[in-house]
Amino acid sequence: MGERHRYRVDVRGRISDGYAQDKFIHEVKATKKQGLTRQLKDIIVYKTEKKLESHLYVLPTTKLSRPLQAAVKAGEFEVHYLTPEQIHAAGRELGHW
């Protein structure tokens, strides 16, 4: 999954769920519905500045909002679907629990 990474967009400090320098940044979300949040918008800004790929990992049952679907269609995120067990394992690996 890569290492967690601290970064800034404007005045906001952020910590990614995964990062590989000069390659990618990613976020893991275990939610029923996922919108294009300020956090995800900040990832778009950061990945564009640093010329990174961005990956969003969600559950197969997660419903993506229309704005997030549009961002995916525009190539802002590559979406990957993980089982609850895989999400939990990723969280353990990243030190979330």
Image (cartoon, grey):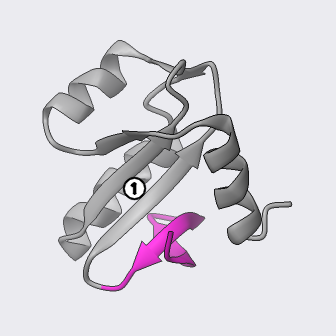
Type of the residue with mark 1: Ile
Look at the image and say whether residue 89 sits in the magenta stretch.
no
The total of numbered circles placed on residues is 1
**Residue under label 1:** 43
Look at the image and say whether residue 19 sits in the magenta stretch.
yes
Depth order, front residue of 94/74: 94
Q: Residues within 10 Å of mark 1 (few under 14, many from 20)?
A: many
The relative height of residue 63 versus residue 83 in the rendered view (above or below) is above
Question: Can residue 61 be seen at all in this image of the molecule?
Answer: yes
Depth order, front residue of 49/21: 21
Position in image of residue 19 (x %, y %): 44, 74
The relative height of residue 35 versus residue 76 in the rendered view (above or below) is above
| Residue sticking out furthest to the bottom | 21
Left or right, 33 with respect to 22, comes to right
* Quadrant, the C terminus: bottom right
Magenta region, residue range: 1-21
What is the secondary structure assignment of the residue under circle 1? helix
Q: Residue at x 24, y 34 (%)?
A: 72
Position in image of residue 31 (x %, y %): 64, 28
Left or right, 92 with respect to 83, comes to right
Position in image of residue 81 (x %, y %): 44, 36
Position in image of residue 46 (x %, y %): 33, 64
Depth order, front residue of 96/88: 88
The relative height of residue 26 versus residue 61 in the rendered view (above or below) is below
Question: Can residue 12 be seen at all in this image of the molecule?
Answer: no
Q: Magenta region, mostly helix, strand or loop?
A: strand
Residue 84 image-quadrant placement: top right
Left or right, 78 with respect to 86, comes to left
